[in-house]
Each structure stands twice: as C-alpha cells, then as structure tokens.
Amino acid sequence: MMKGQYFSFDAIIASVIFVMALVALLSYWHSVKSYLDYQNDDLSRETIRVSNLLFTPPSPSGAACDSINRFGMSISWDDRRLDPAIIDCASGKDQKWLQEKLGSAYPLVINITEFSQPGSPVVTLGGSIQPSTSGKMDIVKIRRSATIYNASSGEAYPAYIDMVLYNYK
C-alpha cells in the first residue's frame, strides 16, 4: 500500500494551474481598471456628451446659421435624421465657432462620411487637428452612425460621424 505518498509531478501541475489562475485574475483586474479609468476621463465624457448633442436640433429652431445659440444637426426632436442644410451651414465655420456652439472646453473636428464612400469624408466641420507644439496631446475619437435626409429629393442615406476631441498636455 502506498497511502499518503507525495508525487512531485502532482505538485508541479498544481503550481502551474495556480500561476495560470493568478495571471488570469490579474489580467481581468487590469482590464476592468483600465476601462473604469477611461470612463472617468474628462475628455472621454465630453466626447460622448458632444456626440449626443449632434443628434439634437439647433437652438433656436429655424434660425439662421449665424444666430443659433446651440449647434445640433438633427431635423427636429421627433426626427433625429441629420439636416444637410445645417451641415452645409456649419461647414463654413471655424473650429472656435463649433467649439463655442457645442459648449465644449476642448477643440474638436467632425468628419461626416457616407457609408458608400468610407475613405473620404463628405464634410469636415472644424477644420483639422492642430498639432501640439510640445508634441504631447490627448485624443479621443468616437464614431456614430446617422442618416442624412435631403428634403428636396426625399432621399435619405446612411453616414458615419467621426468626431475627434483633443487636448494639449
């Protein structure tokens, strides 16, 4: 009888399983911590807030482009499709105007691209990203899908809205 005999191979297998479980637990903890840090970042929260504002109508409704107080691209509160007239109006404005009308403390750039032409933006709002003199900057990008409705032709087409908010360090 060999009761209570200790095999070294059993100890090696148990150690390997323990180390693998410990690595898996630490990996999971790190990924959850990184995700929570990302959600608590001011720039990330601001990006989500501004991207939601894009799907609201401008205020006051029906006002000329130069006299709106708050920028939004949807047709109305009931119809969240984007209005190409508002997009055209905003395409001639600079980044400071867009930042002011969206109430953002950070500079931003918005690219609107049709699904059928994913490589080239149809409209760019806010110009381009201005490089940092120090070379260090935080950038947060978000992509939303939308439908642009052309009232004159009665056609609607899907589009991407790529928004970039950035901050110099």
Image (cartoon, rainbow, N blue to C red):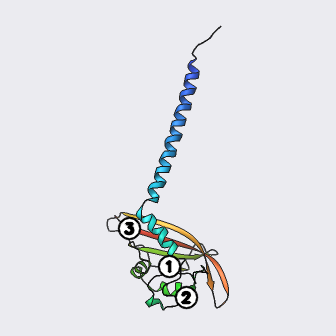
Label 1 belongs to which residue? 124
Nearer-N-terminus badge (2/3): 2
Residue 101 position, x and y percent, is 43, 81
Secondary structure, mark 3, is: strand
The numbered mark at residue 167 is 3
Q: Position of residue 83 (x, y in %)?
A: 57, 84
Which image quarter holds the N terminus?
Answer: top right
Residue visible at 51% across and 72% down? 51
Which residue occupies 57% across, 15% down?
6
**Residue to which mark 2 is pinned:** 85
- Look at discs 1 and 2 and give the one toward the viewer: 2
Give the residue furthest to the top. Answer: 1
User: How far apart, in angstroms, are the residues tagged by discs 1 and 3?
Assistant: 19 Å
**Sequence-wise first label, 1 or 3:** 1
Q: Residue furthest left?
A: 134
What amino acid is labelled 2 in the image? Ala
Q: Amino acid at mark 1?
A: Thr
Q: Quadrant of residue 82?
A: bottom right
Could you say whether the residue bearing mark 1 is in a helix, strand or loop? strand
In the image, what residue type sits under mark 3? Asn
